[in-house]
Image (cartoon, coloured by chain):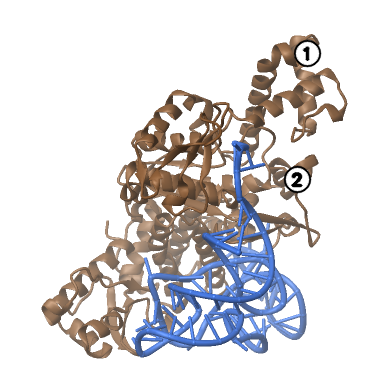
Chain colours: A brown, B blue
RNA sequence: GCGCCCGUAGCUCAGCCGGAUAGAGCAGCGGACUUCUAAUCCGCAGGUCACAGGUUCGAAUCCUGUCGGGCGUACCA
């Protein structure tokens, strides 16, 4: 099926060929004209700025290059019915109504999927996200990451990747022991002061303690049953996390425990690191005071500081198993690895990548590993910033947030209206509102409105045409119809870009634009006219295409598209 | 101090692998419901794209520096 993506590729190839004919060897070998959208829509639907880009190389005026390029191109470009050279040398093109209408017919009948490029080609991707340690409930910070990671996973799936979702957690470190000890204190009914420094005081620990008493009675002691406390706490915490995630409709294919890597996989990795030399000495070196303690010479890799990876007592610091974990992911053969991290991981992630590049080669790592780092969220309630501190339970949990907002869909959508690297204010009051202030309802309302039109039309005995024929285009040649079709036409292209750049916020941007486009169309054009079933049917097709497109895009974000509101 | 991210309308943010007159929502002002859902639409107003240099035919976009904010800078994870 020839859709918007193919159309642009075809036109780009045609221009490339005609440029070759005109300029021969002067044309750079790797130059491929780019098909873009004109800044001002009055100029046309799509544009090509190749003449401007080439002006310096070919030493000709952009307008001269443009005329040369068009002279040697076929008079008829696919899907285009008007070409002009404007301004300093832009080639502007108008998409033919026939092309737009037939695309919309395809969209209405088959949905968006048929027009999305198969970028993944069935290759496999592993998306790691959340990866919070099992020490308590997930918080607002994890919420953004969970939503982002899930949207990236779905986005990759929509362009043909086979995606696995993985949650990595550290269960070998001291935090787990602290959690176990905190549980023991609650179990034994000791005072708060018995909870160790850095321990966990949240109410949930007390609940676990009560449950432990019901299961095992009151005879357990930390000294003799420490492992039981720890493993019980770990499994309860994981249960809590799974339940929090399911509130958002998120399910992982695998929960990968750090402990699976210790000690064999980690020691293998250390052995591998030991053979690496840097310009400033071996990558791995022993501490001058403690022979068991190992340092990574990260400064030799352009990183700000060397780091300890193995302590004198033989235990590992965070980075070490993380390196082993990433090696394991590479070994498992995924074509693409995506890490979704919070801003607090910037440094460690860069350290891990630097080491991976030494072990696997820069190219391998650059090609297969993509890291998405998101900034933190500030919650606003009644116009005030909510201070968050993990200590003393002064944080807003994910479940509380979803509950307060009142809808998982709204929570998910709002987190996705900003690009990952932007700081974000999440206004709980605005999110709660069922009005135009709420971007989700704005989009869903457009969808429900179309559903209403389809119902009205059905009652009048008017339906979407079963087959495409040329007369449809003639009935959709109006300004508002064309504008809506043009918007719809750009969706596959933009979706492909969103997936390629791992930027789901582009989907919410598109949804907002599509919804505005539809609402405007609706305001100006009466769709169902009992006295003119032909044109009504054509407009209905356009509505159905828009409905399908909105529903499919909402689907990428995992948000519901209701038929009634 | 050092590293990464951010700085665009009163507020929240798009746009950023250079392109034509910098966009949207909210807030403000003024309009549109006997007609398919007014949870909507139309119009007005609102900008030295933090600042200063540089590269370029062309810079919000790339480079350098300055200022401001966030995060990190652990033998926590």
Tell me which chain the residue with mark 1 is part of.
A
Residue drawn at 33 percent across, 64 percent down = A4
Q: Residue furthest front?
A: A288
In this image, A243 relative to A185: left or right?
A: left
Judging depth in this view, the residue of A312 and A472 nearest the camera is: A312
Contact? badges 1 and 2 (CB < 8 Å): no
> Residue A335, percent across and down?
34, 42
Q: Marks 1 and 2: which is nearer the front? A: 2
Residue drawn at 68 percent across, 43 percent down = A139
As drawn, A514 above or below A310: below
Residue drawn at 48 percent across, 62 percent down = A543
> Residue A249, percent across and down?
58, 39
Dot 2 crowding, Cα within 10 Å, few <14, some 14–19, many 20+: some
Dot 1 crowding, Cα within 10 Å, few <14, some 14–19, many 20+: few
As drawn, A141 above or below A197: below
Q: Is residue A257 visible?
A: no
Provide the secondary structure element on which disc 1 rests: helix
The image's mark for residue A73 is: none
Mark before the other along the chain sequence, 1 or 2: 1
Q: Which residue is mark 2?
A: A395
In this image, A380 relative to A84: left or right?
A: right
Q: Which residue is mark 1?
A: A214
Q: Is residue A52 visible?
A: yes
Q: Quadrant of the N terminus of chain A?
A: bottom left
């Amino acid at each position: 099926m020839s859709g918007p993506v193919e159309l642009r590729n075809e036109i780009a190839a045609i221009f490339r060929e005609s440029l070759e004919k005109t300029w021969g060897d002067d044309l750079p070998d790797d130059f491929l004209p780019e098909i873009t959208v004109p800044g001002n829509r009055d100029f046309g639907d799509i544009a090509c700025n190749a003449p401007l880009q080439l002006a310096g190389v070919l030493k000709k005026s952009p307008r001269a290059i443009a005329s040369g390029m068009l002279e040697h191109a076929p008079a008829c470009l696919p899907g285009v019915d008007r070409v002009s050279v404007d301004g300093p040398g832009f080639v502007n093109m108008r998409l033919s109504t026939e092309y737009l209408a037939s695309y919309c017919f395809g969209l209405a009948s088959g949905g968006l999927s048929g027009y999305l490029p198969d970028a993944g080609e069935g290759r496999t991707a592993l998306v790691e996200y959340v990866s919070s340690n099992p020490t308590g409930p997930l918080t607002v910070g994890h919420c953004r990451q969970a939503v982002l990671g899930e949207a990236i996973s779905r986005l990759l799936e929509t362009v043909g990747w086979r995606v696995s979702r993985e949650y990595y957690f550290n269960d070998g470190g001291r935090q787990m022991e602290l959690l176990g000890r905190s549980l023991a204190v609650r179990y034994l009914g000791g005072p708060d002061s018995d909870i160790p420094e850095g321990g966990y005081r949240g109410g949930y620990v007390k609940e676990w303690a009560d449950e432990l008493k019901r299961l095992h009675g009151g005879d357990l002691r930390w000294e003799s049953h420490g492992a039981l406390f720890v493993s019980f706490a770990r499994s309860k915490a994981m249960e809590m996390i799974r339940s929090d995630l399911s509130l958002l409709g998120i399910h992982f294919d695998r929960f990968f425990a750090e402990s699976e890597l210790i000690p064999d996989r980690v020691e293998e990795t250390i052995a591998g690191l030991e053979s690496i030399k840097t310009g400033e000495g071996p990558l791995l070196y022993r501490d001058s005071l403690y022979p068991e303690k190992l340092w990574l010479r990260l400064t030799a890799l352009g990183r700000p500081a060397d780091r300890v990876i193995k302590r004198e007592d033989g235990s590992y610091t965070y980075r070490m198993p993380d390196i082993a974990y990433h090696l394991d992911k590479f070994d498992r053969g995924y074509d693409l690895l995506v890490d979704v991290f919070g801003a607090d991981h910037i440094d460690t992630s860069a350290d891990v990548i630097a080491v991976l590049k030494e072990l696997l080669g820069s190219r391998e790592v650059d090609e297969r590993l993509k890291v998405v780092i998101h900034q933190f969220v500030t919650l606003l309630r009644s116009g005030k910033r909510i201070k968050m501190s993990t200590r003393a339970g002064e944080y807003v949990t994910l479940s509380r947030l979803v509950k307060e907002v009142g809808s998982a869909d709204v929570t998910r959508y709002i987190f996705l209206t900003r690009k990952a690297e932007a700081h974000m204010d999440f206004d709980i009051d605005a999110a709660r509102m069922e009005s135009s202030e709420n971007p989700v309802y704005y989009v869903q309302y457009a969808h429900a409105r179309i559903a209403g039109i389809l119902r009205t039309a059905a009652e009048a005995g008017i339906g979407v045409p079963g087959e495409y024929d040329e007369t449809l285009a003639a009935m959709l040649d109006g300004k508002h119809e064309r504008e809506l079709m043009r918007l719809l036409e750009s969706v596959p292209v933009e979706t492909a870009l969103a997936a390629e750049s791992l930027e789901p916020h582009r989907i919410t941007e598109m949804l907002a634009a599509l919804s505005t486009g539809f609402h405007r169309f609706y305001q100006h054009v009466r769709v169902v006219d009992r006295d003119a079933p032909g044109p009504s049917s054509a407009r209905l097709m356009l509505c159905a295409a828009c409905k399908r497109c909105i529903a499919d895009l909402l689907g990428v974000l995992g948000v519901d598209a209701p038929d009634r509101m």
